[in-house]
Amino acid sequence: MINLLLNQTLKNKRMSHIGNFCVVTDRVEYEQADQVFPLHPENQFYLDEIVENKVKGAKTLEIGVGSGVLSIGAVKAGAKKVTALEINPRAKNFAGFNVVLNGLEDKIEIKDGNIEDIFRPVQSEQFDYIISNPPFEPTPPGIDYYLHSSGGIYGLNFVEKLVKDIDKYLTEKGHAQIVTFAPGDDKQPFMLVDMAKKYLRGSTTIKVNPIAMKFDDFVERFVQIGKATAEQVDAMKQQAVKNCVTHLYLCMLHYEKGQDKLNVVSTGKVYENWDLPLESAVPMGKQG
């Protein structure tokens, strides 16, 4: 009876194994704005990049818990306790299920997030490790799109909210780790580099996946999957030309307080097909 009930519950969901645990998400075909994000290469990238000597025993904050994959990964890597913030009620339900599924209900607390002031739910606290896989897709303005991905014309709106205030919430020896798409030219993701220079006064390392894609090719998919008009996407392309943006990169930002320095390096591991869900050749929002 229990197995039958579980099978019925998971019938229209996606069970994915990553690292030494598993999580349940929505399927790619679920097209509502409150979709719980199917696992992508960025999730594996993130778990590969967790700094174990920093996360071990750490009081940890995740902003945008989604399925809970990063919070679970942080605890598996040694985090003492994770406070996870989320604005999407559907995602909170999935994350709670996944936390219990992995036996970590005493290690992870899920709280309501705040879309306008992302640190407000924890405004009196500091954390040893801050993690986030924020909404970061370059997105045509005004379209109805997934909460987990809509990041403004260059995908950096939420990332900017994160980095500009992160020092207030990070302990003196704490560490922050953020995965994001980042626009740039054919040499580097200069918009993320410029943002780090503007807001971060400590030690920053940006690790760049060596496989980039053309910005125009990425935004063109919004027309292909029926989420935007050709006119909306053409306006994005024209703006990109004005700002010298030609490419899109998958990046990991590591940050600690201390000496003001910035390094941009290539990842040791190459993450291919990083714009598609794991084990899928289908863009988000399109059945296949």
Image: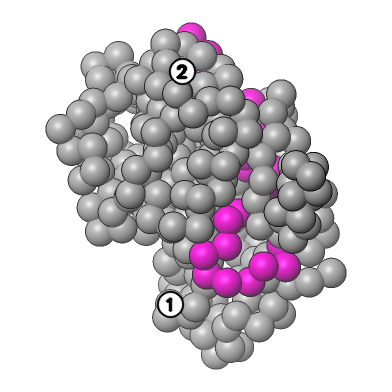
Residue to which mark 2 is pinned: 79
User: At 25% from the left edge and 20% from the top edge, which residue is drawn?
Assistant: 171
Q: Secondary structure at mark 1?
A: loop
Looking at the image, which residue sits at the far left? 124
Could one spot residue 168 in this view of the protein?
Answer: yes
Question: Magenta segment, which residues?
Answer: 28-53
Q: Is residue 158 above or below residue 122?
A: below
Residue type indicated by callout 2: Ala
Pick the residue in front: 13 or 151. Answer: 13
Could one spot residue 238 in this view of the protein?
Answer: no
Question: Circles 2 and 1: CB distance less than 8 Å?
Answer: no
x, y percentage for residue 126? Answer: 23, 26
Q: CA distance from mark 2 to mark 1?
A: 37 Å
Question: Where the N terminus falls, by quadrant?
Answer: top right
Tag 1: Cα neighbours inside 10 Å, few (<14), some, or many (≥20)?
Answer: some
User: At 52% from the left edge and 65% from the top edge, which residue is drawn?
Assistant: 34
Which quarter of the picture shows residue 177?
top left
x, y percentage for residue 97? Answer: 57, 42
| The stretch drawn in magenta includes residue 54 | no
x, y percentage for residue 211? Answer: 71, 45
Q: Is residue 66 above or below residue 50?
A: below
115 displayed left or right of 41: left
Pick the residue in front: 155 or 19. Answer: 19
User: At 67% from the left edge and 46% from the top edge, which residue is drawn?
Assistant: 24
Residue to which mark 1 is pinned: 141
Pick the residue in front: 162 or 189. Answer: 162
Q: Earlier in the sequence, mark 2 or mark 1?
A: 2
116 displayed left or right of 151: left
Instruction: Determine which of the numbered discs, if any, sits on residue 272 in the image.
Output: none
Q: Secondary structure at mark 2?
A: loop
Tag 2: Cα neighbours inside 10 Å, few (<14), some, or many (≥20)?
Answer: many
